[in-house]
Image (tube, rainbow, N blue to C red):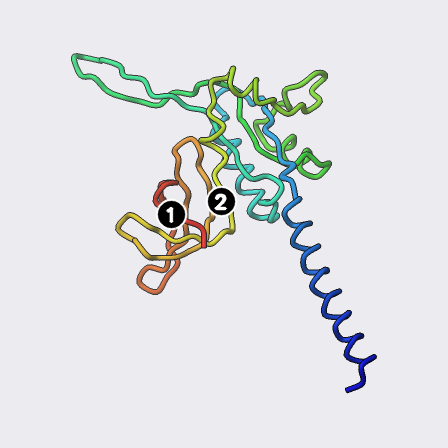
Amino acid sequence: MSEELKVNEDVSEELELNDELEVEEVEELVVDDRKWYVVHTYSGYENKVKANIESIVENLKLQDKISEIIVPMYRVSEEKNGVRKESDKKRYPGYVLIKMLMTDDTWYVVRNTRGVTGFVGPGSKPVPLTDKEIKVLGIDLELFDIDVKVGDYVRVIDEAFEGSTGYVTKIDTSKKKVTVNLPIFGRETPVDIDFNKMETI
């Protein structure tokens, strides 16, 4: 092999290595542009709006743009006829929180969902919540920002299905659970798993 050819091969290898490093650096710089927005709904339609948007997101494969939809809840203890019962109540009746990348398409999907009356913001213009506003609302950001999204493959690490793997079909941040399709008796079956009892693969 000539000395000139060997030098050219060395240069090519170095360029390929640099290209790989640049790609890795670019991937590390990718920023999640999804923000939390507040949507106003008809009273009593909060859960229906949540379910409808989740269905549309799944059908249109928009999971990377609309990642989380929550109806903030809190638990109360009430006594009736001498019996104390616990129940969940909506923290903000008439409102739904959505983590999404705001585009013309995602705005249209959410705004035209049955039961939605508009986004919260000046002149109904969608304005993302700031971290300070989230805290004022008494919402724990750490609760919602789990490192998993719909479509990700996960492994169950602590439950009856420990060691089983499947893909996420739904995320319910208010209940701290994800729905995972697991192979059970040869068929894919949706199973609710706690956030802290699964890991991404």
Crowd band around label 1 with a 10 angstrom C-alpha radius: few (<14), some (14–19), many (20+): many
* Amino acid bearing label 1: Met
Q: Say above or below: 176 vs 59.
A: above
53, 32: nearer the viewer: 32
43, 191: nearer the viewer: 191
Q: Quadrant of residue 86?
A: top left
Crowd band around label 2 with a 10 angstrom C-alpha radius: few (<14), some (14–19), many (20+): some
* Amino acid bearing label 2: Val
167, 71: nearer the viewer: 167
State the quadrant of the N terminus. bottom right
Dot 2: element: loop
Task: Determine the residue located farthest toward the front in the rendered image.
Answer: 3
Task: Determine the residue located farthest toward the bottom in the rendered image.
Answer: 1
Image spot of residue 93 (x, y percent): 48, 18
Image spot of residue 3 (x, y percent): 80, 81
Q: In the drawing, does residue 165 fall left or right of residue 9?
A: left
Q: Say above or below: 90 vs 186.
A: above
Q: Which residue is mark 1?
A: 198
